Protein backbone atom coordinates (compact mmCIF):
# COMPACT_ATOMS: atom_id res chain seq x y z
CA UNK A 1 0.00 0.00 0.00
CA UNK A 2 1.43 3.37 -0.98
CA UNK A 3 0.00 6.77 -0.08
CA UNK A 4 1.31 10.31 -0.18
CA UNK A 5 2.68 11.52 3.13
CA UNK A 6 3.72 14.83 4.66
CA UNK A 7 7.11 13.23 5.29
CA UNK A 8 7.73 12.78 1.57
CA UNK A 9 10.87 14.61 0.42
CA UNK A 10 13.96 14.07 -1.72
CA UNK A 11 16.10 12.61 1.04
CA UNK A 12 14.63 10.11 3.43
CA UNK A 13 14.90 6.51 4.52
CA UNK A 14 12.17 4.00 3.74
CA UNK A 15 11.51 0.61 5.28
CA UNK A 16 9.66 -2.05 3.26
CA UNK A 17 7.65 -4.42 5.46
CA UNK A 18 5.57 -7.49 4.74
CA UNK A 19 2.40 -8.48 6.56
CA UNK A 20 4.02 -11.57 8.06
CA UNK A 21 7.18 -12.01 10.15
CA UNK A 22 10.08 -13.67 8.38
CA UNK A 23 12.27 -15.96 10.46
CA UNK A 24 15.11 -16.32 7.92
CA UNK A 25 17.22 -13.89 5.94
CA UNK A 26 17.77 -14.25 2.19
CA UNK A 27 20.61 -16.76 2.61
CA UNK A 28 18.74 -19.17 4.89
CA UNK A 29 20.18 -17.97 8.22
CA UNK A 30 17.71 -17.96 11.10
CA UNK A 31 17.06 -14.60 12.77
CA UNK A 32 17.53 -14.26 16.51
CA UNK A 33 14.68 -12.90 18.62
CA UNK A 34 11.88 -14.51 16.60
CA UNK A 35 11.52 -12.75 13.31
CA UNK A 36 10.83 -9.45 11.61
CA UNK A 37 8.40 -7.99 9.11
CA UNK A 38 11.17 -5.75 7.75
CA UNK A 39 12.22 -6.89 4.29
CA UNK A 40 14.38 -3.97 3.14
CA UNK A 41 15.79 -0.67 4.42
CA UNK A 42 16.67 1.83 1.70
CA UNK A 43 17.36 5.49 1.02
CA UNK A 44 15.96 7.85 -1.64
CA UNK A 45 19.31 8.74 -3.15
CA UNK A 46 17.96 8.76 -6.69
CA UNK A 47 14.83 10.84 -6.17
CA UNK A 48 11.26 10.64 -5.00
CA UNK A 49 10.20 7.69 -7.14
CA UNK A 50 12.67 5.34 -5.49
CA UNK A 51 10.38 3.94 -2.72
CA UNK A 52 7.62 3.11 -5.20
CA UNK A 53 10.02 1.47 -7.65
CA UNK A 54 11.68 -0.44 -4.82
CA UNK A 55 8.31 -1.52 -3.45
CA UNK A 56 7.19 -2.84 -6.83
CA UNK A 57 10.45 -4.73 -7.34
CA UNK A 58 10.42 -6.21 -3.85
CA UNK A 59 6.71 -7.06 -4.05
CA UNK A 60 7.33 -9.11 -7.17
CA UNK A 61 10.13 -11.04 -5.44
CA UNK A 62 8.39 -11.38 -2.09
CA UNK A 63 5.07 -12.60 -3.48
CA UNK A 64 6.91 -15.27 -5.45
CA UNK A 65 9.39 -16.37 -2.76
CA UNK A 66 7.82 -15.78 0.66
CA UNK A 67 5.04 -17.94 1.94
CA UNK A 68 2.06 -16.10 3.41
CA UNK A 69 3.05 -12.57 2.36
CA UNK A 70 -0.07 -10.92 0.93
CA UNK A 71 0.63 -7.21 1.37
CA UNK A 72 3.70 -4.99 1.47
CA UNK A 73 3.90 -1.55 3.08
CA UNK A 74 6.49 1.20 2.86
CA UNK A 75 7.18 3.24 6.01
CA UNK A 76 9.05 6.53 5.74
CA UNK A 77 11.66 7.51 8.32
CA UNK A 78 12.97 11.06 8.31
CA UNK A 79 15.67 12.82 10.30
CA UNK A 80 16.80 16.37 10.85
CA UNK A 81 19.39 18.12 8.73
CA UNK A 82 22.97 18.92 9.66
CA UNK A 83 25.50 20.97 7.79
CA UNK A 84 27.93 18.99 5.65
CA UNK A 85 26.48 15.63 6.75
CA UNK A 86 24.28 13.39 4.62
CA UNK A 87 22.09 12.45 7.56
CA UNK A 88 19.68 10.33 5.51
CA UNK A 89 22.52 8.02 4.46
CA UNK A 90 23.81 7.84 8.04
CA UNK A 91 20.29 7.02 9.27
CA UNK A 92 19.93 4.19 6.74
CA UNK A 93 23.27 2.75 7.79
CA UNK A 94 22.46 3.09 11.49
CA UNK A 95 19.09 1.33 11.06
CA UNK A 96 20.66 -1.54 9.11
CA UNK A 97 23.38 -1.94 11.72
CA UNK A 98 20.90 -1.92 14.62
CA UNK A 99 18.76 -4.48 12.77
CA UNK A 100 21.82 -6.69 12.32
CA UNK A 101 22.74 -6.29 15.99
CA UNK A 102 19.24 -7.29 17.08
CA UNK A 103 18.50 -10.13 14.63
CA UNK A 104 22.02 -11.31 13.76
CA UNK A 105 21.78 -10.75 9.99
CA UNK A 106 20.77 -8.06 7.48
CA UNK A 107 17.13 -7.61 6.45
CA UNK A 108 16.06 -10.20 3.88
CA UNK A 109 16.60 -8.11 0.72
CA UNK A 110 19.46 -5.85 1.88
CA UNK A 111 22.81 -6.86 0.46
CA UNK A 112 25.11 -4.22 1.97
CA UNK A 113 25.42 -2.28 5.21
CA UNK A 114 25.11 1.14 3.58
CA UNK A 115 27.65 3.94 3.95
CA UNK A 116 30.27 3.79 6.66
CA UNK A 117 29.02 5.67 9.74
CA UNK A 118 30.69 8.83 10.96
CA UNK A 119 32.74 8.61 14.14
CA UNK A 120 30.30 10.77 16.06
CA UNK A 121 26.96 9.28 16.97
CA UNK A 122 24.13 11.08 15.18
CA UNK A 123 21.21 8.94 16.34
CA UNK A 124 20.22 7.55 19.70
CA UNK A 125 20.46 3.73 19.84
CA UNK A 126 17.25 3.58 21.88
CA UNK A 127 15.37 5.57 19.22
CA UNK A 128 16.75 3.34 16.44
CA UNK A 129 15.69 0.27 18.44
CA UNK A 130 12.22 1.77 18.89
CA UNK A 131 11.83 2.28 15.12
CA UNK A 132 12.96 -1.27 14.39
CA UNK A 133 10.75 -2.72 17.12
CA UNK A 134 7.72 -0.78 15.89
CA UNK A 135 8.14 -1.99 12.31
CA UNK A 136 9.08 -5.57 13.21
Image (cartoon, rainbow, N blue to C red):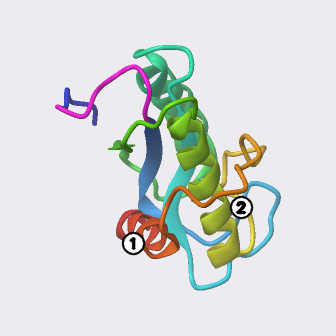
Image coordinates for residue 88, horizontal then vertical, percent: 51, 37
Image coordinates for residue 121, horizontal then vertical, percent: 60, 61
Q: Secondary structure at mark 2?
A: loop
Q: Is residue 44 left or right of residue 120?
A: left
Q: Earlier in the sequence, mark 1 or mark 2?
A: 2
The quadrant in which the C terminus is found is bottom left
Residue range (magenta): 6-12
Q: Is residue 67 left or right of residue 19?
A: right
In this view, the residue in front, 64 or 21, is 21
Q: Which residue is mark 2?
A: 25
Above or below, comparing residue 52 to residue 124 in the picture: above
Magenta span has 32? no
Image coordinates for residue 55, horizontal then vertical, percent: 46, 31
Image coordinates for residue 120, horizontal then vertical, percent: 65, 57
Q: What's the distance in space between the residues labelled 1 and 2, CA to CA?
A: 21 Å
Residue 9 sits in quarter:
top left
Q: Which residue is mark 1?
A: 130
The quadrant in which the N terminus is found is top left
In this view, the residue in front, 109 or 119, is 119
Label 1 with label 2: CB-CB less than 8 Å:
no
Q: Main secondary structure of the magenta part?
A: loop
Q: Residue at x 67, y 82 (%)?
A: 32
Q: Residue at x 39, y 62 (%)?
A: 135
Q: Residue at x 39, y 72 (%)?
A: 130
Pointer 2: residues within 10 angstroms few (<14), some, or many (20+)?
A: many
Amino acid sequence: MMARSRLWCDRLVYVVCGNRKQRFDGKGHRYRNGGSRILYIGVTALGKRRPSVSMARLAERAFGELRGVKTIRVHLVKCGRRRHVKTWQQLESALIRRFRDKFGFLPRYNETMGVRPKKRRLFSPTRLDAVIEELS
